[in-house]
Amino acid sequence: MEQSALLESARHHGSDSFPTLVQNTASHMNSALAKDELIDHIKEQAFQSFKLKAEKWNRFISTEENQRLLLDFLEEGQHQRLVLFTGPGGNLCAGDGQVLLVILSNPNNYSDWPKVVLEDAKKHVEMLKSTMYVLQGRVARCTYLPLPASMECIDEVAVTQYIDTTLLYTIETMVVQWTHLISDVLKLDSAQLILQGENPGPSAEIQFWQRQKENLLGIYEQLQNPKVHKIMELLERTRSSYYPGFQQLTVKVEEAVSEAQDIYLYLGPLKRYVAYLEESNFSNAERLIAPLFHTICLIWTHSKYYCFPNRIGVLLQEFCNLLIDRAFAYLIPKEIFTMELEEGMEKIKQTIRIFRTFKKTFFTYQEQMVCEHSNEASVKPWDFPSHLVFSRFDKILQRLLYIEAVNNTTNVEVRVLTESVFNLKELFTLAIDFLKLEKIEIGGPRGKNLSEEIHCMNEEFHESWKVLQESKYDPLDYNNMLRNGCNVLHKNMPVTAGNLKWSQELRERLLKHRTHFRHINHLILQTEETNFVFQKCEKVLELLDKHDEEMYTSWAGDLSFLCESHLRQPILRYDDCGLFEVNFNEKLSAILREVKYLEILKHPDIPEVAVQLYSKRETLYKYIGNLTLITRQYNRLRRTILPEEAELITHEIGKINQQLKPAFDTLTWKNEDLWNYIEQTRELVQNVVSRVQKVKDNVELIQMLLYGLSETSFLVRKTGATSSLLCLDTNVRMFQLHGLVREMGEKIHQLVQVTMILIK
């Protein structure tokens, strides 16, 4: 029986609207509000929910039973909730939450019900009650174990020794539900957030064990309930197969309670360290690191349940996360380049020092654990790999020490950052030195020209630094770290073309500045230092030429072999899962991209074999696109088709496999008639796939029609307060339903006929 039917039952009891729930807050309000004010509050909620008239409320409040229920709710606290609902004639009624159970407890409410309907209603009410009880626990962040509604019957069984099979089934079902609820709690792990990719702090660890302790204690207390003991005795007496497993689960709960209490007790001293780290200035955190590790070591050596690498590793990772979060709040990564250079450098130095102190202290205490407790068998060393703790921590520290940044603005000729890896502190030092250029003035006959050159260099630096300041680049985000390699400046280009483009731009910059300096007629350009600079410039140009030659030779050396070998490969292959995929080698795709960008760079002497391959790119892309479509459709068919469906299209599957067989053996990318084969295969696969999909759609439509019929109630109640709950005079309704069933049957018959044609 569906929940809608249960609501109908409630309405027959008199409710024309959903009950209103009033939580018990009297214990908190009696000190501030009088009883009359509390009753007025309940009256206001009832008026708003049910649109009551004053006479209905007066009639409700004048009843002695309702007055006693309200007083119990407000004063004695016997009921945690008060449920208001409208009864027969629209009169207001009250209860403590067991509305549906009260309805079914009165035989007069279901005297005309068929037995099947009654049993079904009771089963759904029991399920609804259990579900609501469990949800109530989840809202309170606890685990509630619902008891069966038939506890009175269990008490009778204890006396009469007779056990009804229906009652036993109900109890065993409830025990299975308990098992799932308790097992879910026992499986909880404080490392779950880290495993999910999050970065929690130590507060999450402490809160987890606090909640786990309270939750497990609540479960343990519920298992000590005399009613639960009666249920367990009944299961033991009937030799139920669920009894041994649940007994073992009870023992595990006791062990888990001891574990949670022990861990929460020993984690308690960490609270003040966590609070200080979270609230104090990050620059003051260094003096707290040594006592923090001392406390962690005491937890490791004294706690019975926390002296395991997986637990202490999680705690240390969380402290690393806390330090990282505090460092981010202290530095504000996206504002590092916008703050004053001296201030930014000082903050970076301070952060690096604290990070290094934290890591150094870890290794110090790790060694002490080995030296001081080597003779104590009960104390385990910290022999777990340190990278498990400092994985994220090291990445952030590396970003603090080394940063790869590129200024891709094409209008800026002098770049502060190139592909080289710069120390972040050195970067700020260089920036400070460049800023000093604006104060330099050179005298003498050529001083004006030199000063203008310096002034121009200073402006170019300011432009580059301004671009860096205005960018949204986060220098501490290691996930956005640029790749190592020579194609940093043009990371969207393939390797060879990216390298050549990079060296071309660097060469142009060098030549431009060399030309400018040679046009300066000054004695300073005739010194040994100047000659040394020009020699270095020539050396760099030679290295760039050598770099270009090596890169190009390395790429072009085996082009003929790559093109010839990979173009002679079959056009299809099997992947690791046994599915079909296009066998166009990635190296061929890389060659096509290289040639494209080399032509853009107007590079001379591109190998002929690469040019020929590039000339066929449109044809190759057409082949690849259609073959990809074929393999995806056929793979989806193989993954989704059921064994029963496969038997119906065995012949078609065989034809497709026979058609695809040459693609795995003899057909290569060099075949001249490859397009005709691809077209034939595509039409064959699409035909079978579309037919199978239409058959599946027809079956789903048939199921929807049948489901809609199953949801149609054959027995419904009449309208009106004086009629019985169910209407058994169904001649008119049965005639209507017969027509509906016949109409649906004709539709289903048509769909079956279409399906038979499709699978022939």
Image (spheres, rainbow, N blue to C red):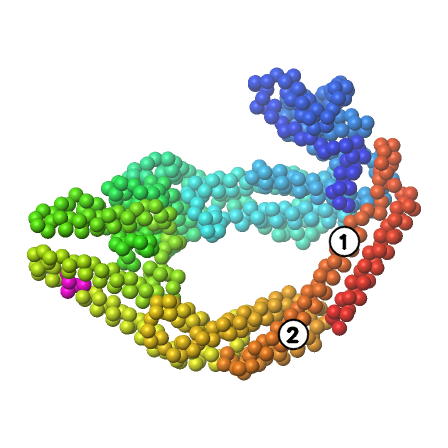
From which residue to which does the magenta span run?
533-537
Residue 178 screen position, x and y as percent: 63, 46
| Residue 610 higher or lower than 424, as above or below | below
Q: Amino acid at mark 1?
A: Tyr
Residue tagged 2: 684
Crowdedness near tag 2: few (<14), some (14–19) or many (≥20) residues, C-alpha within 10 Å: some
For this view, does 416 lie left or right of residue 376? left
Quarter of the image with the N terminus is top right
> Measuring 48% from the left and 51% from the top, which residue is drawn there?
196
> Measuring 39% from the left and 54% from the top, which residue is drawn there?
480
Q: Amino acid at mark 2?
A: Leu
Foreground tag (1 vs 2): 2
State yes or no: residue 536 in magenta.
yes
| Residue 550 higher or lower than 98, as above or below | below
Residue 95 screen position, x and y as percent: 72, 29
Dot 2 falls on a residue whose secondary structure is helix
Q: Tell me which secondary structure the magenta stretch mostly adopts.
A: helix
Residue tagged 1: 707
Q: Nearer the viewer, residue 527 or 703?
A: 527
Crowdedness near tag 1: few (<14), some (14–19) or many (≥20) residues, C-alpha within 10 Å: few
Residue 462 screen position, x and y as percent: 26, 47
Q: Is residue 751 visible?
A: yes
